Image (cartoon, rainbow, N blue to C red):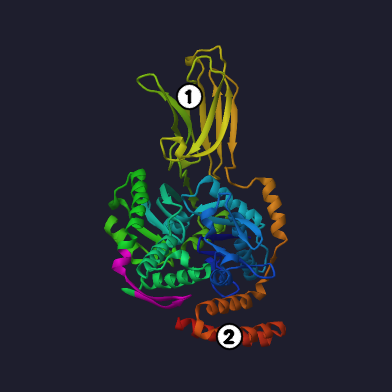
Amino acid sequence: MIVGIDLGTTHSLIGCYSESGPRLFRNALGEYLTPSAVSIDDNGHIIVGEAARDRLVSHPNLSVASFKRWMGTPRETYLGDRAFRAEELSALVLRSLLADAESALGEKVDEAVISVPAYFSNAQRNATRAAGELAGIRVERLINEPTAAALAYGLQEKPEGSRFLVFDLGGGTFDVSILEMFEGIVEVHASAGDNYLGGEDFLDLLQTACLTDLKIRAGDLSPIELALLRRRLEIMKRELSQQVEARIEGKIGSHELAWTIDQERFQQLAEPLLQRMRTPLERAMRDARLHPDQLQEIVLVGGASRMPLISRLIARMFGRLPLRHVNPDEAIALGACVAAGLKNRDAKLEEVILTDVCPYTLGIQVAQRDARGQTLGGLFSPIIQRNSVVPVSREGTYGPMIEFQPKLVLKVYQGENPMVANNILLGELEIPLNPKLPIAANQVVVRFTYDINGVLQVEATPQPGGTRYELLLEQNPGTLGEQEIRARLAALSQLKIHPRSKQENVALLARAERLFEENLSARQLLQQWIVQFRQSVDSQDEQVIQEHRTRFGQALDQLDAQL
């Protein structure tokens, strides 16, 4: 069975392509959205999802979220006394999703199509595949999130030659892609984005404004108090998407909270972030060589795209309102399910070919002499330009800088800056030269080939008729190698993870502990409820547990509504 997965910064979803079309699976709590959060309890058990998100408030030092932003980097996060990379944390989320899928399907899942931001680098894409391997599944196909959104909207069924802009603003990343449909092909013309811009950044704006207005220093708040504040501000951010003004009241630690903000001020605060969004939008349009009136539709996806200021930005830039009839939280997951159906060659789906583009420019380091004969080094010479349709192969000819140079060192970079110091080094290849030949006769033809799986092949052939040298860049600095993946897979297999059947109880207790942190006046009552529920769980009588769980959940609902 092949499933489709949206592995998101804030939430993740899983589903498959069924007889009735794309189908999402509910988790143990009955929800489609599983928070991309991981925590570890006092007994060393791993908790994933809603309970882990609540524990960000009650146990911030044992919980983590938003780790998608660290994919492809060596950054580690400590939960208790164990360090986790983003790939491992993502693998734990994937394991939880796979358990939900297998519970719904009644069969084993062995392969997945996972969505990634269109602007993810090679390192980030390789890290996503590694997360799948650590979770125990095969990930042969990654699908760009905007392309998945296009499939969810059924844009492949639109008239031939239709062009669409997909605007994807998630919790931690921003992507924009321009696609065209023709003859059963979904072709990406251009992609741009910002891997460090999302809903969390708008939440940071509210946090800074709130603390500044109330004259509170962030350093004066404990991790628990700061987590409490951010949770309340997240609720406020959602309210601003539906009403003109939002307000928070209460107390956090020794600090009184009474703060109000309206949409107009939020718009002013967000202006720098909106300006950051304009740059990728303009770049994508420029790379695709399109004018706004040449677009048939603009599609909004990603939970953060619900903010009214996003629709206003689109309206100002493109002179029209965007499509949003598909749930923005579910659109990418539904598209990933369609992609899984396509990969599985489902008979109900007409064959659709999905093309992709190289999201970054790829090239090598060179040096040049200026008019005075002085050498300028560290320059970037592009070979494959960004937004080239893949698979793609391009070549250039390079030579030594000085007579009788014994070798040529090709340093391969990825990026958009004219200086390699501001780009990312992917690898290097050393080419022996004939030191007896003059510069003009000692040239090397360098060919870059970039495939649909994000693998870059570098070939260098000295001219005339020299030996060909090759470098295959499947790995990137910061990503896990095969041996390390095996070692970390063995370590992950030793972790104790709460069984799916117990997740409702774990989530309810985590929610009660979070409310205990938030509601000072109800602490005695909450503590009493927690003790009683733990006793019912210890009884192992499923009927008693279910009845108590229902009453406990209803009581927490009422208490939550009062905050």
443 left or right of 193? right
- Number of the label disc, if any, that sits on residue 542: none
Give the dominant element type of the magenta stretch: helix, strand or loop: strand
What SS does tag 1 mark? strand
Figure quadrant of residue 473: top right
- The answer to whether 166 is drawn above or below residue 409 in the figure is below
Q: Which residue is mark 1?
A: 398
Q: Is residue 446 left or right of residue 483?
A: left
Residue in the image at 63% along x and 64% along y: 98
Q: Decide which of 143, 39 is in the foreground and name it.
A: 39
Of marks 1 and 2, the one in the foreground? 2
Q: Residue at x 56, y 14 (%)?
A: 435
Q: Residues within 10 Å of mark 1 (few under 14, many from 20)?
A: some
Q: Using a 10 Å C-alpha cutoff, classify the residue at mark 2 as few (fewer than 14 neighbours), some (14 to 19) or many (20 or more).
A: some
Instruction: Give the left or right position of residue 10, taking residue 496 as reference.
Output: left
* Residue range (magenta): 246-267
Mark 1 or mark 2: name the one nearer the start of the chain.
1
Q: Is 233 above or below relative to 322? A: below
Residue 357, position as x, y percentages in the image: 46, 45
To which quarter of the image does residue 202 belong? bottom left
Q: Are marks 1 and 2 in contact (CB under 8 Å)?
A: no
> Which residue does the image show at 40% across and 21% down from the upper left?
374
Q: Residue at x 56, y 63 (%)?
A: 64
Does the stretch in magenta take in 259?
Answer: yes
Q: Amino acid at mark 1?
A: Tyr
State the mark number for residue 552.
2
In this view, the residue in front, 541 or 395, is 541
Q: Can residue 20 be seen?
A: no
Q: CA distance from mark 1 to mark 2?
A: 72 Å
Percent x, y of residue 563: 45, 80
Find numbered disc 2 in the image and state the secondary structure of the residue it sits on: helix
Which residue type does callout 2 highlight? Phe
